[in-house]
Image (cartoon, coloured by chain):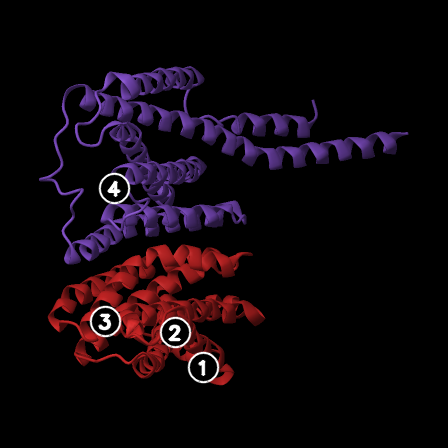
Amino acid sequence: MSLAGEVMLVAGKDLRIEARARVTVSQVLPFGAIVLLLFAFALDPDRGRLAAVAPGLFWVAVLLAALLAIGRSFGIEQQNGARDGLRLSGIDGAAVFLGKTVAIGVQLLALEVVLGLGVAALYGVDVTSVPVLILAGLAATAGLAATGTLFGVLAAGLRTRETLLPLLLLPVITPVMLGATRAFESGLGGDASQAWPWIALLGLFAVLYLSVGVLAFGPLWEDT
Amino acid sequence: MSQRGRDQRGRDQGDQNTRLLNPLVAAGIGWATLVALVLVGLFGLWGAPPDKVQGDAQRLMYLHVPTAWLAYLAFFVTAVASALYLWPRTRARVWDRLAGVSAEVGVIFTALTLVLGSLWGRAVWGVWWAWDARLVTTAVLFFLYLGYLALRRVSGDPATGAKRNAIAALIAFIDVPIVHFSVNWWRTLHQQATVFNPALNPEIHGVMAATLWLGVLAFTLLYVFLVDRRYRLAALEDGLDDRELDRAIAARVGEVQTTGVS
């Protein structure tokens, strides 16, 4: 089977499990939504302060929800010997990495759409450039999903994985957080032309960690 | 001597390699470190003149710059050792241990760099913390390697654990330039750096420069000394489990034999 076929197979498996169990939809998504409410409690919602910092709040909410989604992605492999089954299937480590990255990425994109609409409705932001938002969202999601999958497998199977994953992942994705927030500031009421360097940075980050994942996931997946 | 006894001795001999440096060299480095640190203290406090603008607060630089240098050196060594561990031809336990030990020293000195910088900032800038690009990058660096150490602490099978740690160290290392670049960009797009602007930064000369270089030398020696000591400790810790188990089994076997004979 071709690499693309294997990738789709793994991604399809994860997404099918999600479609049936609906953990992301029924638990992670509401969690992200309530984080949006929490920000309104923490900051003063009346004086336009929320709209001014909406890009940052949006990405923090996405990030927190992403941690849950990534943990879930490797949680499903722990049950019923699923991990051993996947390893025995003869699918290449790189294909497993890309497949799980695609599955996490699709779920994150769905999260971002819903949370984005929530931010637009609750915080009262002006959209100045839709292409900037879409491109920055796609590039940031790719980087987030790639690093998340990489650290997900690093922490998988360890006793303290729930607490270890955020500590490992959050410092590494500092550039994603910065780039995505700055790009969204430009796309939401700012000068859209300033977003392109940040989108380039997000793209670079995504390509770099996708490459690292393709190389490193195999050994991590086989051994641990 | 019994077969088991001979095996035991053979293994002990094989595991004698708990030292990174020759003991004499290590002792020499220890004394040299001490002398250099005392000299840095003397020159830093009395030998060098107070700064024209910053006054005595500038003296913190003689510690702050060397600790930062030591931290970068330590993380660089961690990355190199991790790469050597991953490379099949050079794969050896020593690289895994060295990577972990060096990262530990690096994290401590990154924290020290942040604390010293913060003290200096309070005295000179009037604030404990400023969102300067270098400060933010150093803070992220601290957390990057804190995560790496947390991962190392989760025990498991040593061989797979070592490979996992090595990959994690390299992932962290390649992140450093991107973090540095993005943070730099973030802070300079909005406002020009004022304090660290090269044009405004006065050159330092004479005793002050000499003291600074002495500090860098002293902390480099200190790094080698600390890594050597910590490596020894880590190697002995690793050996402890195996040896205690062997000893307990040997004792148990002896017990069974003596009771069996009678």
Q: Are marks 3 and 1 in contact (CB under 8 Å)?
A: no
Name the foreground residue: A88 vs A83.
A83
Q: Position of residue A197 (x, y in %)?
A: 15, 64
Residue A101 figure quarter: bottom left
Q: Is residue B254 left or right of residue B31?
A: right
Marks 2 and 4, Cα distance to the nearest angstrom? 33 Å
Q: Amino acid at mark 1?
A: Val
Q: Colour of chain B?
A: purple
Marks 2 and 3, Cα distance to the nearest angstrom? 19 Å
Name the foreground residue: A56 vs B3.
A56
Query: Is B142 drawn above or below residue A110 in the view shown?
Result: above
- Residue denoted by label 4: B125
Q: Amino acid at mark 2?
A: Ala
Label 3 residue SS = helix
Question: Same chain, marks 3 and 1?
Answer: yes
Dot in front, 1 or 2 = 2
Rate crowding at label 2 as few (under 14), some (14 to 19) or many (20 or more) other CA atoms within 10 Å: some
Rate crowding at label 1 as few (under 14), some (14 to 19) or many (20 or more) other CA atoms within 10 Å: some
Which quadrant, please, contains the C terminus of chain B? top right
Label 1 residue SS = helix
Residue A193 figure quarter: bottom left
Residue B72 visible (yes or no):
no
Name the foreground residue: B99 vs B89.
B99
Q: Which mark is residue A25?
A: 1
Label 2 residue SS = helix
Q: Which residue in the rendered view is the most extreme toward the left?
A: B199
Q: Which mark is residue A40?
A: 2
- Residue denoted by label 3: A184
Q: Are marks 2 and 4 in contact (CB under 8 Å)?
A: no
Q: Given the image, what chain letter belongs to the residue carrying mark 2?
A: A
Q: Are marks 4 and 1 in contact (CB under 8 Å)?
A: no
